[in-house]
Amino acid sequence: MKKDEVAMIGFEIVAYSGDARSKLLMLLKEAKTGNFTNVTEGIASVDELLKKAHESQTQMLAAEAGGEEVDLGFIFVHGQDHLMTTLLLRDIVMDMVELYQRTNE
């Protein structure tokens, strides 16, 4: 896989995980104010974005696992960083939403 192809995959991962991150932070703000009405559908939307990012990542993993030479660049590494931190943020936001819900009961 050529460097420009890998870079495009990296950009996809950054875009999907970046959108997911923004939505997570918005959901956290809503939960903080006691508004939980959009949390369930918001998390579903976040999960769909993270799924798309993971599918982009899997393209490259499958190519390399199939013996294809993969020319990594910083853009892909940056995408990986975005994806992993967003996955962690999702877990943290879910825990915080649950705490805010308990507090508001």
Image: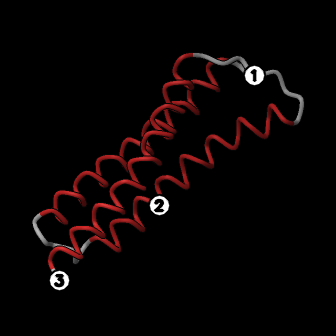
SS state under label 3? loop
Q: Nearer the viewer, mark 3 or mark 1?
A: 3
Q: Position of residue 42 (x, y in %)?
A: 33, 66
Front label number (2 vs 1): 2
Looking at the image, residue 96 sits to the left or right of residue 70; the answer is: left
User: In which quadrant of the rendered view does residue 8 lie?
Assistant: top right
Q: Position of residue 27 (x, y in %)?
A: 25, 60
Please state the horizontal and vertical placement of residue 95, each as a whole percent of the image: 35, 62
* Quadrant of image for the C terminus: bottom left
Q: Which mark is residue 47?
A: 2
Label 1: state its secondary structure: loop
Colour treatment of the image: secondary structure
Instruction: Examine the image and state in which quarter residue 41 appears.
Output: bottom left
- The residue sitting at 33% across, 57% down in the picture is 93
Q: Earlier in the sequence, mark 3 or mark 1?
A: 1
Quarter the N terminus occupies = top right
Q: Residue at x 61, y 20 (%)?
A: 4
- Gap between marks 2 and 1, in whole Å? 28 Å
Q: Amino acid at mark 2?
A: Asp
For label 2, the SS is: helix
Disc 3 target residue? 105
User: What residue sits 51% from the left and 38% below the top?
Assistant: 12
Q: Which mark is residue 70?
A: 1
Of label 2 and label 1, which has the lower sequence position?
2
The answer to whether residue 47 is above or below residue 64 is below
Q: Amino acid at mark 1?
A: Val
Between 19 and 84, the residue placed more toward the observer is 84
Q: CA distance from mark 3 to mark 1?
A: 52 Å
How dense is the environment of label 3, judged by Cα within 10 Å: few (below 14), some, or many (20 and up)?
few
- Whether residues under marks 3 and 2 lie with C-beta atoms below 8 angstroms apart, the answer is no
The residue closer to the viewer here, 4 or 30, is 30
